[in-house]
Every structure is written in structure tokens, then in C-alpha cells.
């Protein structure tokens, strides 16, 4: 009798072990299987949260099939204690294993609210925007110019949220003085910049920053990026260029940047200046004259006078031969690459097509063609002034 009971007990135990093993195997498959989420969501994990709260939130939003399996999977993979605060983009069909990796990986938030400080040629603008997970596009919530009235309530609200992201967007063609002045209005940064960085040394780019970052550290990052861009471009330069060093390439790139209204024209504009340098002709470009007047400190805000075109400054390319002594702005990557790899043309002249700089230029290889293009532009000016 006892032998029969023992035999039945062992059989039952084996069955239970098989069932448990099958259950574990099923749970593992569920953990790594495609999830039920039909559209991307932005998952916010507040500071001080835990895996229990996260799993309940995900279950309520239909992102996971089982909050229990989610928690057990996080425990089994030793990731429960690695939960990070932030806002994270969870894509359509993400598995529980993928979601656990997303919320424990660390690094910057991938969705939610972002504040962008756009440093432009004329001013700084602050934009509060939020990523729409469904379209993966940002929706603007508020925008304002510091110093022009009070900041909107939306800005104050997101400043109080721990997972708000901050970004500095540096426009192509800004001067170093403008960057330093406008960084003063970025109230999430700390510290003062004692000296204006050398003109051209800052890379126009997008920089993610954290509250409390020192402004000097940000400037150093901008300089490091520009140095890397310039070094790579110089190593891949075309043969036979009329420029002798990376610094000369940076100077030429800054002129291309200020003369180019449309991105697709950079290579052609670069060819004009390259052809002029090779021919020993003055560059005769207005932005260099303007820089000689302003030294990069603000915008001239008016047309150039004939006396200014004749005035002798180190940057007046109507008077000096060759390149000016320094860049006249901070050029972007595309202008730097155009400076060292210009298009091959025979153009030595160009003038705006219309009164809108975005319409580009008319290029010419002869003075006769150029004069015709200039006459057409003058007629547009006359029509405007009637």
C-alpha cells in the first residue's frame, strides 16, 4: 500500500514539475514575444517610481499582456533595480523584454516634453514642444523670445518636471559673439564665459544639455565638434585647392555660409570663390565688408554704403586680395565640405535671382552675362520701390 502511495506521489510530483516547466517556458515566450501595442506610446517614469507601478501603467495602456510576467522577467534578468526616471518611447509591438530594456538602459529620455533654445543670427527663441508618439513628430506647445514679455505658463510648468529635456540648437552662420550673448538667456545653464571664442570655432549643431551645465563646458563641446568636422573635411579635400590650411578652409567656408541662401547652391558658390582665388581676383563679397563694420557683434540692419565698400578694413574683400584674416561667422558642416570640395564650374560672378534670398542666385562666367543678371535684379528693386 505504502509503495503504491509513494509511486503515485512521485508520479504527481513529476507531473507538477512538467507543468511548472511548461508554465515557465510559456512565460518566457510571452516575455520576449511581440507585444499587443497597436501604436507607439510615451511612457513616463517619475523619479522614485518602481517596476510595480510601471507594469500596472503598461498593462492599463494595453502595452503588455501580463504585468506579473513583466515584473518576473525584470527580476529574472536582474534589471528591477536599474529602473530609470524619464520619458521613453515605446514602439508598436514592443515585447516586454524590449520595454524592460528601454526603461533600464539609462541615457536621455526619448520622448515627452523638450525645450529647445534656438540661437539664430538675429535672436534667440525658446520653443516648448512635445513628441507625438504616433507620428514621431514634435507638436509645439509654446514659443517666446526671452526678454520680450513674460515667459508663457507652459514653460514654467515644464521647468518643474524632472524628465523635461533641454536642447541648444545653434544655427549656421551665427557669430561667436552672438552665441555667447544668446547663451546668457538660456536660464538652465550656469557660469559665465569670460572670452569670446575664436570666430568660426563653434559647430552649428544641436546640443542636448542638462540643467546646471556650465556654459564654458558647452562652448568647449561646440569647439571640439567643429575641430573634428574641419579635420575630417580637410583630410578629404580635393586636390589643387587655392587654400593652404584648415584655417583658410574655415575662413572660406564662413564666407560661403553667409552668401548662400539655398543649401543646394553651396558647392556652386564655393566654386565661384575658388575660381576667383585661383585667378587672383578680389572676392568682393558684401558679408566680409559687414563683418569689418560690426566685428560680428549684431546685425548691421541696413544696406552697405559706397564709402564702406571702399573703406580699408582687414575683412573688406573689395579692397584686400585673397581671404580675410579670420572667419566671419561659424560655418556648418555643409559649407566646410563645400569649401574643400567645390563644384567644378567656370563661374566667377553671381547675383541674387530675386529679392528673396531663398530663391538663390544667377551665376555667370563672363562680365557681360553678369551685367545682364545685375540689370534684371535692379529692375526688381525698382519695381519694389515704386
Image (spheres, rainbow, N blue to C red):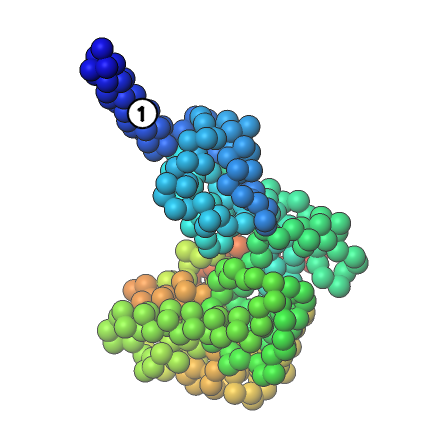
Quadrant position of the N terminus in the picture: top left
Residue 256 versus residue 46: which sits nearer the camera?
Answer: 46
Q: Residue at x 32, y 82 (%)?
A: 244
Q: Is residue 272 visible?
A: no
Q: Residue at coordinates 66% horizontally, 44% vertically from top-left?
A: 141
Q: In the figure, 55 relative to 349: above or below?
A: above
Q: Nearer the viewer, residue 205 or 343?
A: 205
Q: Secondary structure under badge 1?
A: helix
Residue 28 in the image, given as x and y percentages of width and height: 33, 31
On the rendered structure, is 13 left or right of 280? left
Camera-side residue of 294 and 97? 97
In the picture of the structure, the residue carrying the numbered disc 1 is: 20
At which x and y percent is residue 261? 50, 59
* 32 relative position to 357: left or right: left
Nearest the viewer among 82 and 245 is 82
- Position of the C terminus, as image quadrant, is bottom right
In the rendering, at what x and y percent does residue 317 appear?
49, 81
In the rendered image, the vertical position of residue 56 relative to residue 212, given as above or below: above
Q: Is residue 201 left or right of residue 243?
A: right
Amino acid at each position: 500500500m505504502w509503495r503504491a502511495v509513494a509511486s503515485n506521489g512521485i508520479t504527481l510530483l513529476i507531473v507538477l514539475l512538467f507543468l511548472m516547466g511548461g508554465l515557465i517556458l510559456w512565460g518566457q515566450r510571452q516575455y520576449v514575444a511581440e507585444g499587443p501595442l497597436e501604436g507607439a506610446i510615451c511612457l513616463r517614469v517619475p523619479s522614485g517610481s518602481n517596476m510595480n507601478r510601471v507594469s500596472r501603467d503598461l498593462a492599463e495602456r494595453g502595452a503588455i499582456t501580463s504585468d506579473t510576467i513583466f515584473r518576473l522577467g525584470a527580476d529574472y534578468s536582474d534589471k528591477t533595480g536599474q529602473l530609470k526616471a524619464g520619458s521613453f518611447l515605446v514602439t508598436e509591438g514592443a515585447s516586454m523584454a524590449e520595454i524592460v530594456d528601454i526603461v533600464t538602459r539609462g541615457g536621455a529620455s526619448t520622448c515627452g516634453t523638450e525645450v529647445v533654445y534656438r540661437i539664430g543670427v538675429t535672436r534667440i527663441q525658446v520653443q516648448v514642444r512635445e513628441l507625438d508618439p504616433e507620428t514621431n513628430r514634435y507638436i509645439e506647445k509654446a514659443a517666446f523670445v526671452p526678454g520680450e514679455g513674460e515667459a508663457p505658463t507652459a514653460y514654467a510648468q515644464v521647468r518643474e518636471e524632472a524628465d523635461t529635456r533641454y536642447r541648444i540648437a545653434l544655427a549656421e552662420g551665427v557669430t561667436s559673439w552672438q552665441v555667447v550673448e544668446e547663451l546668457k538667456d538660456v536660464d538652465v545653464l550656469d557660469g559665465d564665459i569670460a572670452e569670446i571664442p575664436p570666430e568660426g570655432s563653434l559647430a552649428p549643431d544641436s546640443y542636448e544639455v542638462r540643467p546646471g551645465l556650465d556654459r564654458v563646458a558647452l562652448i568647449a563641446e561646440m569647439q571640439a565638434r567643429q575641430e573634428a568636422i574641419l579635420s575630417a573635411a580637410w583630410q578629404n579635400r580635393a586636390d589643387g585647392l587655392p587654400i593652404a590650411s584648415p584655417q583658410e578652409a574655415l575662413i572660406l567656408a564662413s564666407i560661403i555660409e553667409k552668401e548662400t541662401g539655398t543649401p543646394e547652391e553651396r558647392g556652386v558658390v564655393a566654386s565661384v570663390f575658388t575660381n576667383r582665388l585661383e585667378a587672383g581676383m578680389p572676392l568682393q563679397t558684401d558679408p566680409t565688408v559687414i563683418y569689418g563694420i560690426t566685428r560680428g557683434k549684431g546685425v548691421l540692419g541696413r544696406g552697405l554704403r559706397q564709402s564702406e565698400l571702399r573703406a580699408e578694413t582687414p575683412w573688406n574683400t573689395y579692397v584686400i586680395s585673397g581671404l580675410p584674416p579670420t572667419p566671419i561667422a561659424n560655418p556648418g558642416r555643409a559649407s566646410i565640405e563645400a569649401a574643400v570640395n567645390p563644384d567644378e564650374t567656370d563661374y566667377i560672378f553671381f547675383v541674387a535671382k530675386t529679392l528673396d534670398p531663398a530663391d538663390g542666385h544667377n551665376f555667370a562666367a563672363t562680365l557681360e552675362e553678369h551685367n545682364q543678371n545685375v540689370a534684371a535684379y535692379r529692375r526688381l528693386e525698382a519695381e519694389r520701390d515704386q
